Image: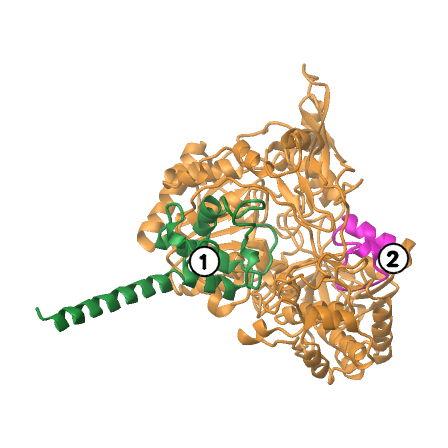
Amino acid sequence: MDRRKFLRFTAGGTVGAAAVSAVYMAPFHKEPQKGPQRVEIPTTCEMCVNKCSVIAVVENGIIHKLNPNPANPRSRSMVCARGNAGLQQVYDPARLKRPLIRAGARGEGKWKPATWDEAFDFAAQKLTAIKEKYGPQATIWSSTESFQETFFKSLGLAFGSPNVERHPTLCLASVNLAYSLTFGTVPAFDLANAKYIIMSGANRLESFITPDTMDLIESAMEKKARLVYLDPRFTVTASKADEWYPIKPGTDAAFILAMINVITAENRYDKEFVSTYTVGFEQLAEYVKPFTPEWAEVETEIKAKDIVRIAREFSDAAPRAVYYAGRRSSWYRDDFQMRRAQAILNAIVGSWDRQGGMVPNQKIALGEVSYLPWDDPTAPRIEDMDKNFPLAAKGDGAYLKMRENVLAGVPYPVKGWMVHKQDPMNALPEQAKTLRVIDQMDFIGVIDVQMSDTAWYADAIFPESTYLERQDPVEVLSGMVPVVVYRQAAIKPLHDTKTTLEISQGLAKRLNLSQYFDYTIDQWIDAEVKELPLEAPLDYLKKHGVWVPPGGPKYGSTLTLEHRFITKSGKIELYSERLQEAGYDPLPKYTTPLQPPSGQYRLILGRRAYFTQANTTNNPWLNQFCPDNQLWIHPNSARDAGIADGELVEVASTVGAVKLKAHVTQEIRPDCVFMLHGYGKKSKWQRLVAGKGGADAEILETAWDKVSGGGAFHETFVKVRKA
Amino acid sequence: MSGTRKNAIKSIITALVVCLVAIAALAATTTKGNEGKGKFYYKQDCKQCHVKGAPGGELTPLSKTQAQWKAFFAKGKHPGDNQPLLKVKDMDEEKLNDIYTFLYNHAVDSPQPETCGK
């Protein structure tokens, strides 16, 4: 190569880099405009589920910074890495800027820009054709929680489809169900005041940074609460815990049952609490007799003497003792049983509605726009919740069972798929099956802010305005201190995007369903705030972004003789008749998990606090901390497979194979491997992660929790070899 | 027509009417109604009198167990004034069934597992 060529190449490269940088930085270099120089607009974050309050600092029509809003006790003086990076969601040059209709084959990445009318007409025509030929039930409407999700759900139900699939069936379904069946509600955990905390795999100091995390740090570090942490990996939480046990995967229920065995046998339970507020203690005490610490030592690989000591310390610290429920997806097909065991353990030591224990959430009542809703769908849900998951939250569905039935065409064919704020290509395990579902569809419509992998395969894309460009309904965040949060636009939409309500209305008009959307967002909000005990609620919320009712956390409101828990017996159910009647175990069942065959490893998952599921890995401010995922593997296992640290490896299960670099570390059990989620994407518009690292969705096998139907993500055994 | 025959026919008709009324009452206690509509009708028709300070006293789905709601709707009357439920505003069988379904499905002992978001 001659010097001239070289210089041109380097200059081109520099110009290229400068061009990319200029594109990202362009909004910040605009000439100053006339108008308000600097305004601060309080709003609510949408970078994860926590919904922290933020204040957008807007200068000359450009958002320069997102600051904390200390008025909200749920977020206090924090805006985490993701919260700060929300700016990049708005100013992402590769975000969806106008409606798109597929021009080439699915997944080819060829798009035709469309007007909103064209996009709505096209989608409505396709959906109507499906309805006429197969019935409205031949459509799936899948969504993730959001302040505007209700409009999308309403559209699906009004259309006549019973198949609304919601994200909890890929997330907290087993926790929600286990605690609901025990206490009639899912409580909060008063970590700030707890004296003894046990966590199974809930990596709160690394996977998810919220004020709960700060409470945990304060409790553990400053107030000297004891933190016992069980995880096959040595995570950041493990490094700060008082005790860490690399528990054998899938045996947490054995650990908990053994704790209950010790506590009941040694009369360490809260007798008054148990006799006044619970039912089923006698059956429980009898049932746990075989689950001795010695038995549990064999199952869990945790020494019996430690299990005994922890059980004694836990009950001594009660009621300021909690076994933390966890905030994520199910791991195993028996996940529900483990969460039930947790709930029961916490109950028998009386850690309920008391400081430092589990505390039932308080709510705030909001008004609503009143209108006569649609007729019930005539067809049953495709996954027959009544038959397969009779106790689960029917409105959420059971996503993976649904997918099986769609592929089998039973009990009826499905030909349409509408998606809101979700990326099933990455959210569901066994991506090959998701691709087969996609092939079966006559129509796929996606509402999103970025070109997700699912959008990449869609027929019509409806670009949503980001949370910083939107007026949303008011929301209540229930909790120990409930709050009302407000989300208002910091800037007008940068591009030709709409809100989910507007998208739903646009489609409804063409589907003859407008009567169910006959309100503006302002009318919706007016109805919501009418019930609030404030003089001018909207003015207050616009100005402050959040309303916190006076009073602070309340303890003990359910600890009265008159209180009736929302359970069958009216009491806390250690023994559950409802479970028994539905054909399940009324007390937590334990099954020794299968072990990976020799030469294979269990694939386990977890999160880092930069990433919301598969959603934010392409955000440049977050991606820079973790540009690709690596396979964690123990040195012994690596040696057996002939793998060196940093080497490219192939990880294969029965359903797929991916390649990523190995991270050889002692910080994981030899029988497990670990990888992060949200890499190896197909969407070429997500340049930072397209084809980079590996997509766990490709190799995870399909499994679900038996009682809740929630996806179980730790049931896959993999082979690892040099790539 | 003879007197006894007239009486027999009358008895049969009465029996039929009783059966129909009983069937109607039974129909009002199924839980296959539309609970979404039931919630709307409940707010529109029942809540007027069933809030704090109002004549009927505060009443929400959580005020009764499923068995209690079932018994209440089987009777089909307001205990206070013996007023049939069907006589409330512009009530009809279908609306009543929808309201019953809503209240039954959200009773204080009903299985209503919590979820994230709405």
SS at mark 2 in the image: helix
Q: Position of residue B60 (x, y in %)?
A: 55, 53
Q: Can you identify the residue that label 2 sits on?
A: A220
Residue A457 seen? no
Quote the CA–CA distance across marks 2 and 1.
48 Å
Nearest the eye: A367 or A42:
A367
Letter of the chain in orange: A
Nearest the eye: A112 or A609:
A609
- Name the image quarter holding residue A569: bottom right
- Name the image quarter holding residue A58: top right
Q: Position of residue A713 (x, y in %)?
A: 63, 64
Seen in the image, is A319 located left or right of residue B23? right
SS at mark 1 in the image: helix
Q: Chain of mark 1?
A: B
Letter of the chain in green: B
Q: Can you identify the residue that label 1 sits on?
A: B101
Give amino acid for label 1: Thr
Q: Chain of mark 2?
A: A
Which quarter shows the C terminus of chain A? bottom right
Q: Position of residue A184 (x, y in %)?
A: 63, 62
Residue A239 seen? yes
Q: Residue at x 78, y 71 (%)?
A: A272
Q: Which residue is most to the top? A: A34
Give amino acid for label 2: Ala
Magenta segment, which residues? A190-219
